[in-house]
Structure formats: structure tokens, C-alpha cells
């Protein structure tokens, strides 16, 4: 039995390596490697290195947060506070993806701001009234299609603004930002099942809000 | 009120929309997937819901942010960085929240657990052996006085050994509240044994009592009301029992104060304090860094 070819193959393959995926993938990813180098320099007191990280991620973070806090000023404050917090807690970074770490800090800041906004309600989502922005359209874009797309985006944004904060955060992180369930669970500090449940319930809630405009999305 | 015939629950109302949502997200497997697939195949409303949810997910993925341009640059200035950099006690406490000192959490938990376990087990073992810190002084007093004599059956028996044994008496026997001495002359018929009521003593002897034959009236004299306690204190008959208790408690207190603290107990207490201190520091560090 010891001479069986199957065993020889198994021996030749060697033992299955059980490795920390984070530690193995970080050096292979040039983006993460760059981020870690910048963070390490920032930890050593190099403010320019930290500001390089800010430059790399400020647009992405603002785009993420402005979907969760659709008010320009509040979203801006939120992102600024997230970078402040990141700078304060650089030593608390436990490895892994710097982008996920920054996202997590920003999401927490957004949640805090939303809680504060609920305690002190003001004009809800004034920026949604701003129609100055139009989605980029190609030269060949049909005006009807462009108008339909604009209307669809506006409907989605309005509906997103009316669902719960947790559901909105989960849907934005999953559908828009493209994070997977595990990453969202880590960022938001909840279980995988909770993330799934929030996404499912959030989509059902969106469908309720969009019930009278579903023709925009069908076909 | 008659039921409205127009509002009738359809079969779709009893279907689980979350199941359909999970199917639309591709999160179902095995039995649930079969059930959900059956639902959307047999129920047109469920099928519509499924298609709508897929369309919404697709549309959401393509939706641009409501505000595309960030209003300002978020880079930190030198002044902001200096203000944000932790200093003083914040830096010290914050260090406990860093990954480099992550071992302080298990260390704190371990120390606190060991300390608490040591204290608990120490007390339990002492209790099961019948010893107590309060009983020891009394026996020590009796032993050191060397006068623990108990008159029984006409003879005098030295109770030095018994006094030593009493140091292992249960705690319940420790406060030897001397009750009134039943110094009745009629008891002399037993050959000189005078029962001394020791209400709180369980099975432990009360060796630190010295009964005096002459005091008890065995030699024909009227029974005296005083029973001398080894160590100099005297107990009295019921009418004079209060001073005796006071004197005894004073004796116990003085001996208690003189007894040295147990080194093992001190070590366990220190372990508990250090462990809890580390945990508190980590908690404070977390709140400082979160602030």
C-alpha cells in the first residue's frame, strides 16, 4: 500500500499549506504594498506619506460616503473626520488592506453622522434636489436613453435615501463598491448573515419605494 | 362588520419574499433554492418580484453618486497633524491598544483568573480543613499561656494539644461566645465536670477556658462567677456576661491585628489587581483611540 502511486503523488505534492491569506496576498498586490509602505512611513512621522494616502483614496471615500450621507457638507465633514481618525489611529492598523481599513473608518464616521442627524433632524438630503449633475453620455447616446437613465438614477438615489442606514450601507458597499459579504461584515462589524439579510431586505424596501416607477427598470 | 370581498389574501401573500430576494441575490443553496425556484415558477407575482429585484440590483450598481465632485482637499496640514498626534498620557495609554501590545489582553485575563482562582481555592481549602484565621488567635493564646487546663473527672488534663487542634476548628467555632457558665453546685455530682455552654462552638473543643475548682465551688466554697480565660480574660456568670464578651473580642482583635498577612493571598490579590488594571488600560486605550 505504501508503494501505491496515489501515495507517491501525495508525497510529491507535499503538505497542504494553511496560510494566512492576508499575509500572502499583501506583498503580491502592488497597490496594497504601496499602501503599506506609505502607512509605515506615516507611522514613522512622515506626514507627506500620509497625505499621499489621502490623495489616493479621498475621491473613492467621498464617492462612497456621499451615497450614505447624501449631503455635500456632511459627507465632506465625514470624510475629513475619517482621515483625522485614521491619522490618530495609525498604530492601531492591524494589517490587511489599507483601503478596507479606511473604508471601515469612513463608514463608522458616516454612521455616527447619520445617528447625529436623526437626533437633530434638518432638511433631509438637500443635495438630491440638485439636478445640475448629469451622467456622462457618449456622443452616440440617444437623448431618450439619456433621459431614461437620468430618471432611473434619480429614482434609485431617492429610494436609497429612504431606506434604513444599515440597509443603505450594505447595498452601497455590495452593489456599488463591489465588496463581498465577508469584507462588508468586517467593515460594518456585523455577521455575514446580517449583511445578507440587510441586502435582501434593503432590495425589497427599494422595490416597495420604486413600485410606481418600476417600468423604468423593466425591459 | 362583513369582510370586504375585494381584499382577499392570495396565495402570493403567504409566500416568503425574503426567499425570493435571496434567490435573486444568488445566496441560496440546496433545499431553499429548490423551494424558491418552485415559487417563482408557479407564482407569477413571485416571478415579477424576482425580476424586479434583479433589475434593481443591476441599476443600483450603475448609479452614479449624487454628488460627484468632492468639495475640498482632505490632506492634513502640519498644524492638524500636530494637533491629532497623541501626546502625554494619551500616547502611553494608546500604546496598550496597539497590536504590538495585544498580548496584554490575554495576560490581563490570565492574571485576573489565576488571582481569583487562587483566592477562591485558598479560602475553600482552608474552610474544608476547618481552619480559620479567627480561630487561630484563640488557640494560640491558649497555647502560649500554657494554662489550658480543664478539670474533668476529678483530674486535671492539660489541653495544650487540644488548643493546637482547635486552630483547625471551623470558622463557626471561631468567635467563642462564651455563654453563661452553668456553675450549678448540683453539677458537682458528676465528679467535678462543669458544663460550660458554648453556643457557637460546633464540634471543636473550647480549650482556652480554665475552670477553677475553687471558683466552681468544688472545694465547698460558693461557686465563683468568674471563669478565667487563658490569656487573662475572665468570663462571668450570666449577670456579668457582657464584660466577658467585650474582653474576649478585644483579645481577638488584638491578636488579629498582630497576625502577619498571608504572602500567598497577597500574591493572588496582586495578580487580580494587575490583571484587571491591564484590562482597564486596554479599554481606556480603545476609547482614547476611538475618540
Image: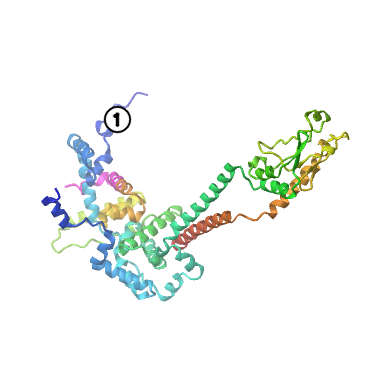
Tell me what residue is drawn at x 53 percent, y 55 percent: B272
Estimate how packed mark 1 is, as few (under 14), some (14 to 19) or many (20 or more) residues with alpha carbons within 10 Å.
few
Q: Main secondary structure of the magenta part?
A: helix
> Among all residues in the image, which is located at the extreme top?
B2
- SS for callout 1: loop
Q: Is residue A162 above or below residue A60?
A: above
Residue B145 visible in the snapshot: yes
Instruction: Please tell me in which quadrant of the rendered image residue B8 appears.
Output: top left
Looking at the picture, tell me which residue is in the foreground, A146 or A18: A18
Looking at the picture, tell me which residue is in the foreground, B236 or A69: B236
Tell me what residue is drawn at x 24 percent, y 66 percent: A29
Q: Position of residue B50 (x, y in %)?
A: 21, 42
Q: Chain of mark 1?
A: B
> Among all residues in the image, which is located at the extreme front?
B155
Residue A132 visible in the snapshot: no
Relative to residue A208, is residue B245 drawn left or right?
right
Q: Position of residue A43 (x, y in %)?
A: 38, 71
Looking at the picture, tell me which residue is in the foreground, A58 or A73: A58
Across the whole image, how many numbered discs are drawn on residues? 1
- Quarter of the picture containing the N terminus of chain B is top left
Q: Position of residue A7 (x, y in %)?
A: 15, 51
Instruction: Please tell me in which quadrant of the rendered image residue B67 appears.
Output: bottom left
Residue B15 forms part of the magenta stretch: no
Name the residue carrying label 1.
B7
Q: Is residue B226 above or below residue B283?
A: above
> Among all residues in the image, which is located at the extreme right?
B221
Q: How is the image coloured?
A: rainbow
Which residues lie in the magenta part? A199-219
Q: Position of residue A50 (x, y in %)?
A: 35, 71
Tell me what residue is drawn at x 69 percent, y 54 percent: B257
Relative to residue B61, is residue B284 drawn left or right?
right
Q: Is residue B80 above or below residue A137?
A: below
Amino acid at each position: 500500500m505504501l508503494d501505491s502511486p496515489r501515495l507517491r503523488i501525495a508525497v510529491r505534492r507535499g503538505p497542504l499549506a494553511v496560510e494566512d491569506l492576508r499575509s500572502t496576498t499583501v506583498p503580491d498586490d502592488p497597490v496594497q504594498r504601496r499602501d503599506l509602505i506609505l502607512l509605515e512611513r506615516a507611522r514613522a512621522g512622515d506626514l507627506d506619506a500620509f497625505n499621499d494616502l489621502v490623495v489616493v483614496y479621498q475621491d473613492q471615500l467621498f464617492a462612497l460616503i456621499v451615497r450614505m450621507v447624501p449631503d455635500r457638507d456632511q459627507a465632506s465633514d465625514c470624510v475629513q473626520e475619517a482621515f483625522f481618525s485614521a491619522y490618530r489611529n495609525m498604530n492601531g492598523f492591524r494589517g490587511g488592506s489599507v483601503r478596507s481599513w479606511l473604508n471601515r473608518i469612513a463608514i463608522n464616521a458616516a454612521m455616527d453622522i447619520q445617528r447625529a442627524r436623526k437626533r437633530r433632524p434638518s432638511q433631509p438630503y438637500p443635495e438630491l434636489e440638485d439636478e445640475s449633475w448629469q451622467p456622462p453620455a457618449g456622443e452616440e447616446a440617444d437623448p431618450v436613453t439619456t433621459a431614461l437613465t437620468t430618471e432611473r438614477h434619480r429614482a434609485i438615489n431617492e429610494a436609497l435615501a429612504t431606506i434604513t442606514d444599515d440597509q443603505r450601507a450594505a447595498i452601497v458597499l455590495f452593489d456599488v463598491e463591489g465588496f463581498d459579504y465577508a469584507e462588508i461584515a468586517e467593515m460594518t462589524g456585523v455577521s455575514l448573515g446580517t449583511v445578507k439579510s440587510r441586502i435582501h431586505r434593503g432590495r425589497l424596501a427599494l422595490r416597495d419605494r420604486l413600485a410606481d416607477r418600476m417600468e423604468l427598470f423593466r425591459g | 362588520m362583513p369582510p370586504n370581498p375585494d381584499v382577499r389574501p392570495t396565495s402570493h401573500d403567504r409566500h416568503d419574499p425574503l426567499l425570493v430576494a435571496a434567490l435573486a441575490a444568488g445566496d441560496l443553496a440546496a433545499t431553499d433554492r429548490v423551494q424558491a425556484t418552485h415559487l417563482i415558477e408557479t407564482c407569477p407575482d413571485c416571478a415579477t418580484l424576482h425580476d424586479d429585484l434583479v433589475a434593481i440590483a443591476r441599476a443600483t450598481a450603475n448609479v452614479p453618486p449624487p454628488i460627484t465632485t468632492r468639495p475640498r482637499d482632505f490632506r492634513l496640514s502640519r498644524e492638524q497633524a500636530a494637533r491629532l498626534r497623541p501626546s502625554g498620557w494619551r500616547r502611553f495609554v494608546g500604546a496598550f491598544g496597539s497590536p504590538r501590545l495585544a498580548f496584554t489582553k490575554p495576560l490581563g485575563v490570565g492574571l485576573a483568573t489565576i488571582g481569583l482562582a487562587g483566592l477562591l481555592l485558598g479560602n475553600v481549602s482552608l474552610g474544608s480543613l476547618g481552619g480559620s484565621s479567627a480561630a487561630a488567635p484563640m488557640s494560640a493564646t491558649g497555647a502560649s499561656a500554657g494554662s489550658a487546663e480543664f478539670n474533668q473527672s476529678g483530674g486535671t488534663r492539660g489541653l495544650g494539644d487540644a488548643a493546637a487542634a482547635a486552630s483547625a476548628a471551623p470558622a463557626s467555632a471561631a468567635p467563642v461566645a462564651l455563654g453563661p457558665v452553668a456553675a450549678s453546685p448540683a453539677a458537682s455530682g458528676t465528679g467535678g465536670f462543669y458544663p460550660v455552654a458554648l453556643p457557637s462552638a460546633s464540634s471543636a473543643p473550647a480549650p482556652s477556658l480554665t475552670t477553677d475548682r475553687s471558683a466552681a465551688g468544688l472545694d465547698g466554697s460558693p461557686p465563683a462567677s468568674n471563669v478565667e480565660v487563658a490569656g487573662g480574660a475572665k468570663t462571668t456568670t450570666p449577670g456579668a456576661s457582657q464584660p466577658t464578651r467585650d474582653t474576649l473580642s478585644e483579645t481577638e482583635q488584638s491578636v488579629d491585628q498582630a497576625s502577619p498577612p498571608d504572602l500567598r493571598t497577597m500574591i493572588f490579590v496582586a495578580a487580580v489587581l494587575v490583571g484587571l488594571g491591564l484590562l482597564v488600560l486596554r479599554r481606556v486605550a480603545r476609547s482614547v483611540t476611538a475618540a
